[in-house]
Amino acid sequence: MEQMKAFIEKARNDSGLMAKLDALGAAGAGADKIVALAAEYGFAITEEEYRKANEQTGARKTGELKEEDLEAAAGGILTENRYDPEVCSKYTETHYNCVGFLGMNWCDHYRRVHPANSQPTGRHTCVMGFFDYQFKT
């Protein structure tokens, strides 16, 4: 998992690598493509390590990162305007473009509303109006 953490850190600090990861994510590429890209940059990670990191961040399920996951994954969420009406109009729920690689690069328009401790549901919303739905915790 150390190689995965190092790869994540590299991605956070290398805009070219992040652009390649974004392109793979937007294209729906599988873990094998991410592993191959990591190898191009000198990182030996497995598909299982990538899947585990993805599950730990919760990015694929909810777009939410827990504080401890943020620290473990190199710490912090970046945001940028990822809005593209031709792409975004196809979304009815949170997508890779909303949260980026392992949930590290959120779109400025994506919101995840956390439920209060006593409530079992929260919301995913796009402020541009493409989706607004509840999820269960």
Image (cartoon, rainbow, N blue to C red):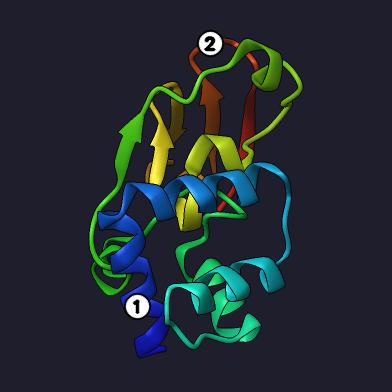
Q: Which corner quadrant of the image does residue 30 belong to?
A: bottom right
Q: Which of the pair 49/40 is nearer the observer? A: 40
Residue 68 position, x and y percent, is 27, 69
Quarter containing the N terminus: bottom left
The residue to which callout 1 is attached is: 5
Q: Residue at x 72, y 56 (%)?
A: 29
- Asked where in the image residue 135 lies, by quadrant, the reply is top right
Q: Position of residue 124 (x, y in %)?
A: 55, 32
| Residue type of the residue flagged with mark 1 | Lys
Give the secondary structure at mark 1.
Answer: helix
- Circle 2 Cα neighbour tier, 10 Å, few/some/many (<14 / 14–19 / ≥20): few
- The residue that disc 2 covers is 128
1, above or below 67, in the image:
below
Q: Nearer the viewer, residue 56 or 105?
A: 105
Towards the viewer: 90 or 40: 40
Q: Secondary structure at mark 2?
A: loop
Q: Position of residue 86 (x, y in %)?
A: 70, 14
Give the answer, above or below, for where 41 lies relative to 89: below
Name the residue at 39% across, 43% down: 105
To which quarter of the image does residue 81 belong? top left
